[in-house]
Structure formats: structure tokens, C-alpha cells
Amino acid sequence: MNDTVVVGVDGSPSSLAAVDVAAHEALLRGARLRIVHAFSRPADLDPMIHGVLAGAEQRARDRAPGLEVARTVASGETLTVLRSESRHAVLTVVGGRGRGGFGDLLLGSTVVQLAAHGHGPLMVVRGRPGPEGPVLLAVDGSPAGAAATDFAFAEAALRGAPLVATHVWNTWSEPTPYEGPADPLNVVVDLDRLRERHQRLLEEAVAPWREGARPGAAVELRLERARVRHTLLDASREAQLVVAGARGHGGFTGMLLGSVSQALLYHADCPVAVVRGTE
């Protein structure tokens, strides 16, 4: 990846809010900002270039004086264009709602697909304006989760914010290896043993960064026995950013995006960054 932050703009208020966030993210990284618009009807192109995109560029410059800003338009479907642009970006930023007010319908057809099939981290701007608080990392224990953990530590450092690494577990969220008597109906769940196992999972997930890559980083470990999605969505109300992996622990290989990540994209109360691990 290079030193460019890409932001998708379609003229909607949500996409313009995404320009503000993308400009800030580019400034934090010392990166350039690239404003991208995908079009399918040439008749809409001229007013978009001279109106919305010019306004978005000025908005970015006002938000981050001195930032290097470029804008481009490309013919094609929004998902295809942004996926291509994300190949050359250190971060791709989009709004949670698109032009036309379709809301969740647009989110489901474009943003979730981009989170599942794009390249590099995707940040979706949603929730309350100007959120404050820690960076919240959703630790799922998956092998691919290291990419999300690395991004969360880096993002917290860039923002000068504390990092809260949260792992939520319960007795039905994943299969527990059966080690009891011959009859599976006789299994008794050992909650203390499960809690210890999930505590180790949480500690091991962040250990390489606490002890190696970013020693001394301010990180709080939270282990909660509760409903996963409900707990993380509730925690997003006090966070400035939620970071999650694209696939959860034990996820089906054919699933486009983990269910927890999808829930965050639809319902979190602050921006959400979805980070894909190495395939």
C-alpha cells in the first residue's frame, strides 16, 4: 500500500462527512487524500465535477490545511470503482448512507461488499458526530484478527487515545470441545475453565503488540460474558472508533463478512473500521 487515503463521494451528506474524517485520517498519517466518484450516467458528470467534488475538495482543505488533495471520477459501479481504488490506498473511507436515502439497503449492497472484498482497511463513517472516547478493538480470537489488532494499536497511537481490547464470550457462541463421559447429554459446562480460556485468548491476541511492536501502549483488556453483538454495540456509544476483523472465529469460509462486523457496520454509534486479514 502507498501513502494515500481514498474517500468515496456521491454527493450525500454522509459522504461529505466521510470527507471530513478521511482528511483527518490522511493528516494523521502524513498521507495524501484522494476523493473518488463513480458515475454511470455521463449527464450527471459535469455538475458533480464542478459542484459536489469541488466542494468536497475545498471541504478537505479547510478541514486539514496543507493536506495534498486530489480528486478523480471513474466510469463504473461504485463497488467496482472503490474496490479498484482501495488497491492503492492505506485506508479507504466511505459514508454509512448514500445518495437517495436508501440507507441500509445501500449499505448492504455496497459497503458490506467492499468490507468483504476490498483491499486494506475500510472505515465507515456512521453514528454520532464528533465521537470521543477510546479506540475499541473487538477481539475475536481468529487467526486473521492480527491485522485488526495491528490497525487498532496504530490508530490509537495516531489519535493519542487509549485502546480498549474487548473479547465477549458466552457458552453458546462457539462449540466447546467435549471431554466428558460417553453420553454428550451429560456434559457439564465448566464456566471457570471457559473464562480462563477466553482470558488467555484475549491476552495472547494483544501480547505481540504490548510486549513487542508497541511496548508501553495504553491498552485496557475487557473480558465480558454476554451477547457479543449487543455488548459491542453498547460499547460503541462511548468509543470514537470501533475496529473489527472481517471474519470472526470459526466463521464459514464462504461467508462474505462476519455477522458481528456486519452488525457494527449497520448499528454502531461511531465510525467502524473493518480490517481484512491475510487470505
Image (cartoon, rainbow, N blue to C red):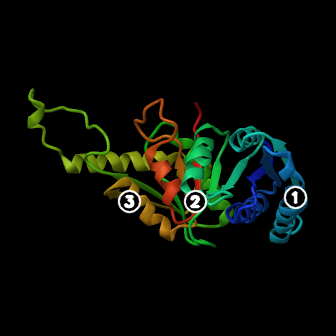
124, 79: nearer the viewer: 79
Measuring from the top left, give residue 201's x and y in whole percent. Answer: 39, 45
Callout 1 crowding tier (Cα within 10 Å): few <14, some 14–19, many ≥20 = few
Residues marked 2 and 3 touching at CB (< 8 Å) = no
Q: Which mark is residue 121?
A: none
Callout 2 crowding tier (Cα within 10 Å): few <14, some 14–19, many ≥20 = some
* Label 3 sits on residue: 230
Give the residue type at disc 3: His
Q: Residue at x 43, y 50 (%)?
A: 203
For label 1, the SS is: helix
Measuring from the top left, give residue 224's x and y in whole percent. Answer: 34, 58
For label 3, the SS is: helix
Q: In this picture, is 168 found above or below 252?
A: below
Measuring from the top left, give residue 130's x and y in whole percent. Answer: 63, 73
Mark 2 or 3, nearer chain start: 2
Callout 3 crowding tier (Cα within 10 Å): few <14, some 14–19, many ≥20 = some
Q: Residue at x 22, y 51 (%)?
A: 192
Q: In this picture, is 130 found above or below 168?
A: below
User: Gap between marks 2 and 3, in whole Å?
Assistant: 27 Å
* Label 1 sits on residue: 47
Residues marked 1 and 2 touching at CB (< 8 Å) = no
Position of 220 compared to 14: left or right?
left
Marks 3, 1: nearer the viewer: 1
Give the residue type at disc 1: Pro
Q: Residue at x 82, y 68 (%)?
A: 59
* Label 2 sits on residue: 217
